[in-house]
């Protein structure tokens, strides 16, 4: 048999190094059933043996919103314009929660799944993607509660309106998910070697929240502390949150430039994350 | 006939870092990166030594695998054998893409599914049925494939009654049955299996082996099989490779490979022992050895062939018939099993060279390790010489009928009695 001919017939090859960049979409597609089963598992196992079940998803944002309303609006006196402060906070928190849930869920990928990853191969990226999707379901439930409160306030005479740009709201959520996924993949890869990063994540997310305009309008920080306000300007998350409030509640501003910047950063982070993730998945099992 | 190579491993090596990963990792990483951007070789690839767990090495880096080359033909069942730490599992991990080799490559013409563990990804909160789908998908099956085999899987597992109960309520045996059942219905071109037969009770083992046979023999699937159970390896595999300290030392037919492995990998063997200093004014002991009838001391002792114990002793006295040889047999736990002596037979010792052979019937010893203690007895009354643990020997499984229980039966001997049914 001709050797050269022979080599061409190999179905695949296992080698030390990955090609510089490879997201094998076809392979991911082959494993799509696994993706859905992971999502199903994540969703099912959260409710099992709880009395309140999915209600737990609602308690956290509601309580946080109430707390924020008391502290930031009633005590600190942040003005939310015509929008009820509670609704203002709830909108910010709902969107923000989606990001943190994605980040938290994916940044743990390698460590939490070392057991499975050490025994069987499937495209590793399935795991973080499944987290982002199952988190989307959680987001959906939280969003429904937002809508319920929206309607409640509306019929109680609050001056509420949605902006026509709400049609692009799903795009915004996708950006949020991809950003969380990208960052999560990046961090999960680094955690395999240096556990320090998992400590960083916990309080890092909290700090980031204060820089992401979750409980205040973006304008306000620039007005109050012009010296440091620019930090928020460079935070892509702040644009997503500000814009989603603009869409949902018709308050604040929409900055096309800011959104283009956000989109750019998201794409860059996602691809860096993917790159590092691909490099790590080949041999992380030796170091984790 | 043209060979149809389905899998080819070329120069596979794998390096591991020993000690605590963490301290010094950063400096090594930086150094490695610094070499890399200058276009130099990874400085840590050069150092590293043979992976021998028992000796203390000087380097922090070891080669768990070194230059492994082999080819597997379509439909072949390859057994990979070796001691603990020989690199078998590392090889399987590389084959199943769990970790990447440090150098070398593996080329394949077929989809590989690996079974390094049963029940990977089982979730206790989910029901048996849900877990079948999840586990199947993790192993690479599509939902459609699983659905079409669901009834068979459930039936094979024997857990029908519990199938809609969360798996955390299962006994460990049931979990394993369910998990194996899923794996048994995998249909890749190449199947990689590690030690999974060590689970479950005898009945289930029998079922599992039978299924494995169907997979390899009946359906012509290519299988790579790692096990310490030589009986299973012998009955399932057609070819064997023996690994030692991360190197491939033998690649032959399965019987040769198993013999080589069991024979202490060819280096030393304790089935015979020569003596220089067991001497007094009455006798001089030359050699004691065990072998299967018709084989030599260098071959492994197989349970289902006659085994002979040969004692070579020189008697210096004229009244040699006064002396008898008695052995006490111990198992590897140090429990004495029984004693036997030539005084119960017609054979007596004579002056001069004596080569005394005692033959054990077929299937007398159960596979395992044994040791003998020698006594030289005078006038059947008192022992004038005793040597404890004078020789150790290991009896191994013979090839067994396919599909029968592959584990070790209890006890130390396995005599065959006459049965009658009136």
Image (cartoon, rainbow, N blue to C red):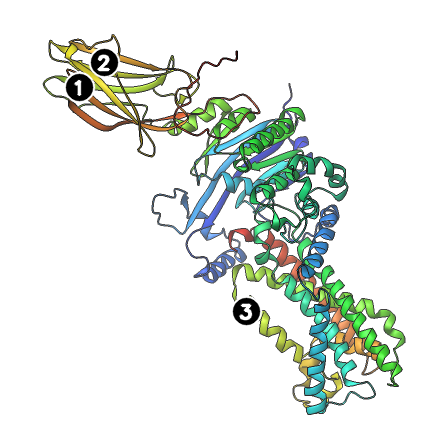
Residue A129 in sight: no
Label 2 with label 3: CB-CB less than 8 Å? no
Q: Position of B177 compared to B353: left or right?
A: right
Callout 3 secondary element: helix
Q: Which residue is mark 3?
A: A199
Q: Badge 3 sits on which subunit?
A: A
Q: Which mark is residue B377?
A: 1
Q: Count residues near mark 2 (Cα–Cα under 10 Å), then give few for <14, some for 14-19, many for 20+.
A: some
Q: How far from the left and from the top, in percent, is residue A240?
A: 76, 74
Marks 1/2: CA distance?
A: 9 Å
Q: How far from the left and from the top, in percent, is residue B259?
A: 43, 24
Label 1 with label 2: CB-CB less than 8 Å? yes
Q: Which mark is residue B343?
A: 2
Marks 3/1: CA distance?
A: 75 Å
Q: How far from the left and from the top, in percent, is residue A62?
A: 72, 76
In this rendered view, identify the residue nearer to me: B314 or A257: B314
Q: Nearer the viewer, mark 2 or mark 3?
A: 2
């Amino acid at each position: 048999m001709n050797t050269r001919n022979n080599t061409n017939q190999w179905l695949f090859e296992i080698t030390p190094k990955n090609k510089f960049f490879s997201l094998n979409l076809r392979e991911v597609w082959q494993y799509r059933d696994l993706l859905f089963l992971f999502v199903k598992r994540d969703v099912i196992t959260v409710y099992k043996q709880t009395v309140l079940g999915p209600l737990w998803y609602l308690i956290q944002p509601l309580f946080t919103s109430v707390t924020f309303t008391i502290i930031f609006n009633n005590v600190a006196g942040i003005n939310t314009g015509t929008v009820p402060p509670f609704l203002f906070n709830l909108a910010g928190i709902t969107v923000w929660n989606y990001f943190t849930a994605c980040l938290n869920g994916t940044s743990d990928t390698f460590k939490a799944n070392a057991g499975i990853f050490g025994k069987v191969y499937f495209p590793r990226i399935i795991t973080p993607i499944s987290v982002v999707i199952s988190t989307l379901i959680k987001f959906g439930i939280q969003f429904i509660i937002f809508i319920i409160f929206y309607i409640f306030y509306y019929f109680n005479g609050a001056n509420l309106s949605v902006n026509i740009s709400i049609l692009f709201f799903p795009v915004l959520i996708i950006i949020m998910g991809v950003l969380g996924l990208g960052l999560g993949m990046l961090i999960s890869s680094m955690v395999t070697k240096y556990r320090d990063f998992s400590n960083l994540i916990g309080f890092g997310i909290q700090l980031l929240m204060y820089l992401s305009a979750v409980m205040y309008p973006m304008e306000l920080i620039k007005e109050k502390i012009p010296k440091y306000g620019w930090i928020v300007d460079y935070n892509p998350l702040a644009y997503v949150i500000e814009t989603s409030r603009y869409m949902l509640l018709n308050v604040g501003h929409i900055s096309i430039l800011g959104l283009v910047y956000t989109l750019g950063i998201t794409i860059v982070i996602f691809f860096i994350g993917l790159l590092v993730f691909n490099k790590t998945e080949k041999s992380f099992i030796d170091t984790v | 006939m043209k060979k149809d190579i389905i899998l080819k491993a070329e120069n596979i090596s794998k390096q591991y870092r020993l000690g605590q990963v963490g301290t010094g990792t950063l400096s090594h990483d930086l150094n490695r990166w610094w070499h890399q951007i200058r276009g130099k070789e990874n400085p840590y690839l050069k150092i590293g030594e043979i992976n021998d767990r028992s000796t203390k090495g000087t380097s922090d880096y070891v080669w768990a695998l070194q230059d492994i080359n082999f080819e597997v033909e379509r439909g072949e069942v390859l057994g990979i054998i070796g001691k603990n730490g020989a690199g078998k599992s590392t090889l399987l991990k590389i084959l199943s893409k769990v970790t990447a080799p440090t150098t070398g490559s593996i080329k394949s013409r077929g989809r590989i599914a690996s079974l390094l563990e049963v029940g990977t990804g089982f979730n206790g909160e989910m029901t048996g049925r849900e877990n079948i789908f999840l586990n199947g998908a993790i192993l690479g099956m599509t939902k459609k494939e699983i659905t079409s085999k669901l009834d068979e899987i459930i039936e094979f597992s024997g857990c029908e009654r519990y199938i809609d109960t969360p798996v955390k309520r299962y006994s460990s045996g049931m979990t394993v049955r369910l998990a194996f059942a899923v794996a048994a219905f995998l249909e890749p071109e190449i199947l990689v299996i590690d030690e999974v037969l060590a689970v479950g009770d005898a009945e289930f083992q029998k079922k599992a082996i039978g299924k494995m046979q169907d997979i390899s023999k009946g359906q012509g699937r290519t299988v790579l099989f790692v096990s310490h159970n030589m009986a299973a390896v012998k009955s399932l595999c057609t070819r064997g490779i023996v690994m030692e300290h991360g190197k491939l030392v033998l690649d032959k037919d399965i019987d040769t490979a198993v013999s080589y492995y069991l024979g202490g990998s060819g280096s030393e063997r304790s089935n015979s022992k020569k003596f220089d200093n067991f001497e007094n004014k009455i006798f001089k002991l030359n050699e004691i050895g065990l072998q299967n009838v018709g084989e030599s001391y260098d071959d492994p002792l197989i349970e289902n062939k006659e085994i002979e114990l040969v004692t070579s002793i020189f008697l210096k006295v004229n009244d040699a018939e006064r002396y008898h040889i008695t052995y006490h047999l111990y198992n590897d736990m140090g429990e004495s099993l029984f004693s036997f002596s030539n005084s119960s037979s017609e054979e007596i010792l004579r002056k001069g060279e004596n080569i005394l052979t005692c033959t054990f019937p077929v299937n007398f010893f159960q596979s395992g390790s044994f040791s003998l203690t020698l006594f030289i007895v005078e006038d059947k009354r008192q022992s004038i010489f005793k040597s404890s643990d004078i020789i150790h020997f290991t009896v191994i499984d013979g090839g067994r009928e396919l599909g029968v229980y592959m584990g070790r039966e209890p006890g130390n001997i396995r005599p065959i009695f006459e049965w009658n049914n009136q």
